Amino acid sequence: MEVLEYLDNKGDVIVKRIPESGQLEIKWGSQLTVRESQDAIFFRDGKSLDLFTSGRYVLETQNIPLIGKWVTSFGYGPDSPFRAEVLFIGKQLFTNLKWGTRDPILFRDTELSIIRLRSFGSFSIQVKDSLLFVNKIVGTRGLFTTNSIEDYLRGIIVSKLNGVLANGFTSVLDIAKSIDNLSFLLRNELKDDFEGIGLQLHDLYIQTISVPEEVQKQIDTRSGIGALGNLDQYMKFKVANAIGDSANNTGEGASAFNSGTGLAMGMMLPQMMQNSINNSTNNSLNSIEKIKKLKELLEIGAISQEEFDEKKSILLKDI
């Protein structure tokens, strides 16, 4: 081989060995071209002789002392071929790699007990130390792509995610509000692990954190209750309105209220009274009683509808 170079047309090759076949030989004086986004490592007998950054090189003694010393020590002539190999390492940013939890993560939630979480996201890597990466990860493989290492890195990410969730969060409700903070904590935890194999973790994003359907229903129920505000106050407001609205019924309607609706209200009021004892003041209880008295006065014609509505509005403010 007289020209040594490699172009990655797909953009997913991290390491490529040239020549591919062990039967080919490199000619002394050959040209080596390394692009801006590459490193090249010259190997002979399983040992690295030199690392080349971007540029154009001629394999001659005066240009590459380490290779020249090795060649002359074995008595090669100026035009003699020799067995060796060059590994081209892609130094560009490899983006949009995927990670996710193949199995659910058990998470102890202070509000929802122990639940199972699933999480998915993306990350980007870059080769930081070419020699370290080749020696620790690539080994003797002639072609090493992002698919070759994605599963391995995914396992590291999920393992660290377990620890970050356990140490930094107490409820899945807090996690949902802190996705960006969780991503930042996870990147910091992974930094040393990636650098230990010659890689740099450029970015990592958590796109989703999901819970089982039954847990999602619990969250929806809690959200609905929270949207009502103080449930005790809400129920008392509904009862007072129901009492006031019944005053507009006459004849059979009034009779229906006194029998059917009145019975239903009678069944509800004991529970309402119990809630009031725990959550309300005596003033709110008195206000409800006064509304009931006003309703009775309206029914016997002692007060007008306008007077009833005015007094009821004032009393509701105290509930």
Image: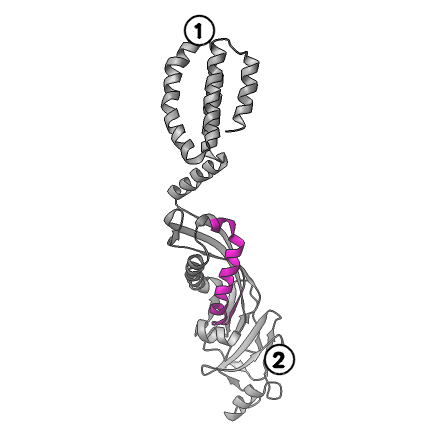
At label 1, the amino acid type is: Gly
Of circles 1 and 2, which is in front? 1
Q: Please name the predominant secondary structure of the magenta segment in the image.
A: helix
The residue nearer to you, when weighing 201 against 244, is 244
Left or right position of 210 against 54? left
For the N terminus, the quadrant is bottom right
Against 6, residue 73 (above or below) is below
Against 262, residue 286 (above or below) is below
Which residue does the numbered mark 2 point to in the structure image? 57
Q: Which residues are magenta?
A: 174-201
Against 302, residue 273 (above or below) is below
Tell me if I can see residue 134 in this picture. Answer: yes
Q: Position of residue 99 (x, y in %)?
A: 46, 57
Identify the coloring.
one colour
Residue at 43%, 50% (x, y): give it.
171
Place residue 262 in its image quadrant: top left
At label 2, the amino acid type is: Tyr
Residue 75 belongs to the span the image colors magenta: no
Left or right position of 70 against 35? left
Q: Position of residue 73 (x, y in %)?
A: 51, 93
Left or right position of 147 against 106? right
Residue at 55%, 90% (x, y): give it.
69
Spatial CA distance of label 1 from label 2 is 107 Å
Q: Position of residue 52 (x, y in %)?
A: 58, 78
Which residue does the numbered mark 1 point to in the structure image? 251
The residue nearer to you, when weighing 151 against 104, is 104
